């Protein structure tokens, strides 16, 4: 027994052991706080890409009218197609594409006239023609493509990336979702963080607006100066710290971080979203429309360390063309073809294409048969989850590549079918993350973006 402390040797060792354990806990808490702040860096291996720009063509663009030509549809025009699949709505005979396909680049990959400008970059693009989803409905297919599960509430791809790799700019969000003119179907669930820390959720930006005050809601206070806000935030931080000492709650940490980030963004976002700092020639390259502007903003954001930017196209007028597909697809493609091509050109010129992964596609494709109203053709196409196309460029992708195929008519994936889980596994791999190791423990089990599925598509990696 120590005459000074009244402790036996056994008590001393026992209490010291608790202290050593607390040292380990401190390390774990430090890592958890880094995750909350979006600054955790745990790549599993050397990455090919550092950032992602994802064009989401909302509503389901027709693969047989864009990147998957099917001459057999012309041969069978007006006739029934053998071995058709069950569709959501009544469809009729083979419906040939009203658009001309041409070969582009040294690879000679065929691309529709709808994407003629993008086609000029086809030697930098991998075209996956054998994608498939689970059901022919927008809501579950949006969730599957964005969050890896069509039914359960799960974190989005951008949230997983920010969880795994953190953010390179503490003054901007790690994940930004730009959607002009309002929210798509399922709204913010498309960029949710679910059970991951709330600070990893995508920051929504209404890119139809041009001023930063309207682009990002409540970016500035109309009542308090910058210095007054700093003092208010300091007081709030002090109160929050006192409250936090008594409990461990990820939601509280995320809320504290959101206040801090909102304050820091007042200056950083103003600069990042100001495309007037770009040369006139660069602005002309992207075009004057809202999609050209938001694509240029996306390049400025990833240039400043934002991990992922999702650019929504067709939220207010989707690619869901059940009728008059010739006029509607032509209009929609005219809005996005130039911005995609401009981004690829701009990134390459700046030396950023090699480590920026660019993706475009929708939640599913469309039928090669014409949709009917009664027995009359509507000159449109129904939803088709059996087969569709997604394109990738940059970020370690082997350009000038076609992977997989649909059948003769474009109804279903046939050669090398690719699930959405396979696509997600490949994206994570290019970003230096093993999809089987990137997990988060919640409700007693380890979750991951790809659930228990997913194979990396090594054939499209350069």
Image (tube, rainbow, N blue to C red):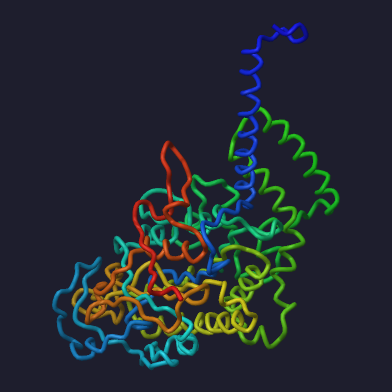
Q: Is residue 95 above or below residue 446?
A: below
Q: Tell me if 4 is positioned left or right of 455 in this view.
A: right
In this rendered view, identify the residue nearer to me: 431 or 215: 431
Please identify the quadrant where the N terminus is shown.
top right
On the image, the x and y values in percent for residue 382 come to 29, 72
- Image vertical order of residue 20 relative to residue 437, above or below: above
Q: Is residue 28 left or right of residue 120?
A: right
* Marker count (numbered): 0
Residue 181 visible in this rendered orientation of the protein: no
Question: Residue 209 appears in which quarter of the rendering?
Answer: bottom right
Please report the residue visible at 77 percent of the width from the left and 44 percent of the height from the top. Answer: 233
Q: Position of residue 429 (x, y in %)?
A: 46, 63
Instruction: Give the residue drawn at x 57%, y 77%.
Output: 353
- Give percent across and percent down for residue 423: 40, 65
- Residue 25 sits in which quadrant? top right
Question: Residue visible at 38% across and 54% down?
Answer: 149
Task: Decide if residue 63 is in sight here.
Answer: yes
Nearer to us in this view, 78 or 165: 165
Residue 155: x and y, percent? 47, 52
Query: Residue at image x 76%, y 6%?
Result: 3
Q: Is residue 369 left or right of residue 21?
A: left
Q: Residue 337 or 378: which is nearer the viewer?
A: 337
Left or right of 166 on screen, residue 435: left
Quadrant of the rendered structure where residue 104 is? bottom left
């Amino acid at each position: 027994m120590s005459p000074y402390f009244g402790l036996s040797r056994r008590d001393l060792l026992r209490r010291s052991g608790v202290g050593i354990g607390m040292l380990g806990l401190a390390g774990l808490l430090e890592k958890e706080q880094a995750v909350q702040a979006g600054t955790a860096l745990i790549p599993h291996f050397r990455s090919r890409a550092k950032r992602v720009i994802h064009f989401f063509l909302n509503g389901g663009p027709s693969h047989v009218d864009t990147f998957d030509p099917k001459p057999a549809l012309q041969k069978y025009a007006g006739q029934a197609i053998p071995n058709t699949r069950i569709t959501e709505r009544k469809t009729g005979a083979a419906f040939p594409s009203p658009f001309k396909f041409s070969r582009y680049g040294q690879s000679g990959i065929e691309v529709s006239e709808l994407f003629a400008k993008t086609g000029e970059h086809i030697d930098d693009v991998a075209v996956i023609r054998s994608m498939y989803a689970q059901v022919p409905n927008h809501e579950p297919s949006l969730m599957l493509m964005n969050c890896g599960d069509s039914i359960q509430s799960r974190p989005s791809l951008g949230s997983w990336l920010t969880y795994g790799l953190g953010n390179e700019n503490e003054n901007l969000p790690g994940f930004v979702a730009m959607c002009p003119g309002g929210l798509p179907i399922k709204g913010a669930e498309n960029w949710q963080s679910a059970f991951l820390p709330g600070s990893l959720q995508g920051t929504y930006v209404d890119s139809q607006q041009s001023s930063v005050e309207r682009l990002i809601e409540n970016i500035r206070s109309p009542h308090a100066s910058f210095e007054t806000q700093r003092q208010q935030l300091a007081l709030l931080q002090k109160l929050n710290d006192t409250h936090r000492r008594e409990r461990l709650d990820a939601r509280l940490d995320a809320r504290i971080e959101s206040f801090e980030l909102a304050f820091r963004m007042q200056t950083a976002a103003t600069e990042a979203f100001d495309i007037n700092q770009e040369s006139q020639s660069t602005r002309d390259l992207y075009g004057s429309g809202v999609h050209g502007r938001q694509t240029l903003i996306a390049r400025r954001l990833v240039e400043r360390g934002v991990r992922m930017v999702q650019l929504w196209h067709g939220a207010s007028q989707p690619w869901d063309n059940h009728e008059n597909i010739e006029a509607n697809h032509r209009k929609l493609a005219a809005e996005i073809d130039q911005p995609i091509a401009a981004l690829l050109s701009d990134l390459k010129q700046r030396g950023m294409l090699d480590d920026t992964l660019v993706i475009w596609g929708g939640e599913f494709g469309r039928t090669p048969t014409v949709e009917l109203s009664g027995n009359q053709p509507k000159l449109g196409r129904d939803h088709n989850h059996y087969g569709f196309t997604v394109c990738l460029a940059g970020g370690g992708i082997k350009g000038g590549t076609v992977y997989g195929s649909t059948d003769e008519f474009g109804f279903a994936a046939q050669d090398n079918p690719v699930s959405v889980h396979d696509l997600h596994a490949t994206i994570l791999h290019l970003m230096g993350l093993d999809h089987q190791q990137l997990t988060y423990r919640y409700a007693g089990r380890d979750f991951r973006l790809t659930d228990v599925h997913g194979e990396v598509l090594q054939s499209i990696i350069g």
